[in-house]
Image (cartoon, helix red, strand yellow):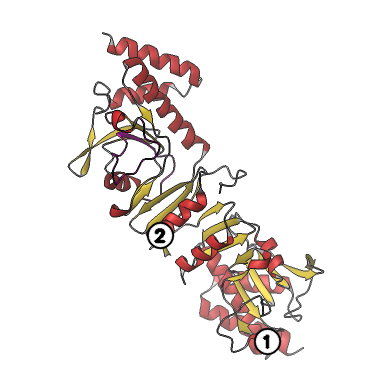
Amino acid sequence: MVAAVELPDEQGFLLTDVSWDFYERLLQEVGNRHIFVTYNRGSLEIMSPSWKHENEADLLGLFVRLLAMELDIPIKGGGSTTFRLRRVEAGLEPDRCFYIQHWASVKRKRVIDLSIDPPPDLAIEVEVSRRLADRIEVYRRLGVPELWCYGGKRLRILLLQGDQYIESERSAAFPKLLAKDMHTLLEKSLDISESQWGRFIQEWVRSEYCR
Amino acid sequence: MTVAPSEPQEQGVLLEYMSWDFYERLLEELADQKIFVTYDQGRLEIMSPSWKHERYAGRVAMVVRIVAMELKIRFVSGGSTTFRLKSAEAGLEPDNCFYIQSVDAIVGNDEIDLSVDPPPDLAIEIEMSRRLAARIEVYRRLGIPELWLEDGRSLRILRLVNGQYRPSATSAALPMLLPEQVHSLVLLSETTDEGSWILAVQDWVRKNLLSA
């Protein structure tokens, strides 16, 4: 299953009162195609990502990787793996996600099962179009400890404290990193190529962290 | 399964390489909720109709009903029943449909099974929203003999001739009624309330079709 290529826009659909079994049947049918399915206690959103959505997710993913490489922090990228947990009736594919603090516990895993494995330490959520599903609520129920929500205008860091997300000025996975700095860096990406931007980020990390 | 009521706009998604089994499982899950699912050889569109779309579908259907009633033409409304045929890998809910010429074949039926029953004689398709699926191709494979396509600017008739749709100036189901007349009557509804409009359509039918 794949989204029709001739349609440039993000398309989406939200169904409600959908059973968990149907959700699993849909995931099977979708296979490894790049479609985002969000399940939240009976409501099911099907979304095919747009160009802009994927661009921004890529950029933030690149940022995480460069940061980790420069700072020599071990990470493992989880991409847009489907994370689901029947017990909390929640499931989704993050726009991008990473194991950082829990890198060691998943480094050799071939499959992640949230009923035994930890959730990713950091997920990136790109908010290009208004999502029909309450994705943050799903991340919350899956127990993802840190979210970077990027809406083009603003980058918010949300940290799970108890069972609620609280907006934070700084990241938990990368403790020196401030949301406002990240926003400035992302703005910079608009005018230059990704490779130039990558080098720019590397230099920024070196100057910022080696002071 | 229902569309979230907080979303007033039309929403739709097209998925490809979906199995017939999945299509049937989805229809089961949707039960009787008003969501349009179009299946076309693996391509599956899920769409929730807009207010405008539904309003036009209702009005074109009302013209059909009033004409048929006034002229004592027997008919059965099929509404937006799901019509599907596994052998053709095709299925959809028409925006509206009617049994007219073959009304005797299905009158009293609780269910329609296209592998034994005839398809509706007339289907109404409102082309006002961006449909992602090739709906006309699906109507064709289901063997629906006549389509009325209303897009807000005109109403066109397509009739099935040797397995292909051809534009036609006249209807087979209601030969006394011209497509431009149906379209004018539907447009008239935009200027008034539904009750007054129904009376005006009745009046028009009596003056123009009954006296002839």
Residue B198 quadrant: bottom right
Output the chain of dot 1: B
Q: Kindly indicate whether the residues beneath marks 1 and 2 are on one polypeptide chain.
A: no
Residue B45 quadrant: bottom right
Can residue B131 be seen? Answer: no
Where residue A193 appears, as percent x and y from the top left, is 51, 20
Closer to the camera in the image, A191 or B52: A191
- Amino acid under disc 2: Asp
Can residue A24 be seen? Answer: yes
User: CA separation, marks 1 and 2?
Assistant: 38 Å
Above or below, B3 against A141 in this view is: below
Task: Inspect the magenta stretch and tell me whether residue B112 lies in it.
Answer: no
Q: Quadrant of the C terminus of chain A?
A: top left
- Residue indicated by mark 2: A21
Q: Which residues are magenta?
A: A108-134
Where residue A77 appears, as percent x and y from the top left, is 39, 30
Furthest toward the right, the residue is B162
Pointer 2: residues within 10 angstroms few (<14), some, or many (20+)? few
Q: Which mark is residue B105?
A: 1
Output the chain of dot 2: A
- Amino acid under disc 1: Ala
Closer to the camera in the image, B182 or A52: A52
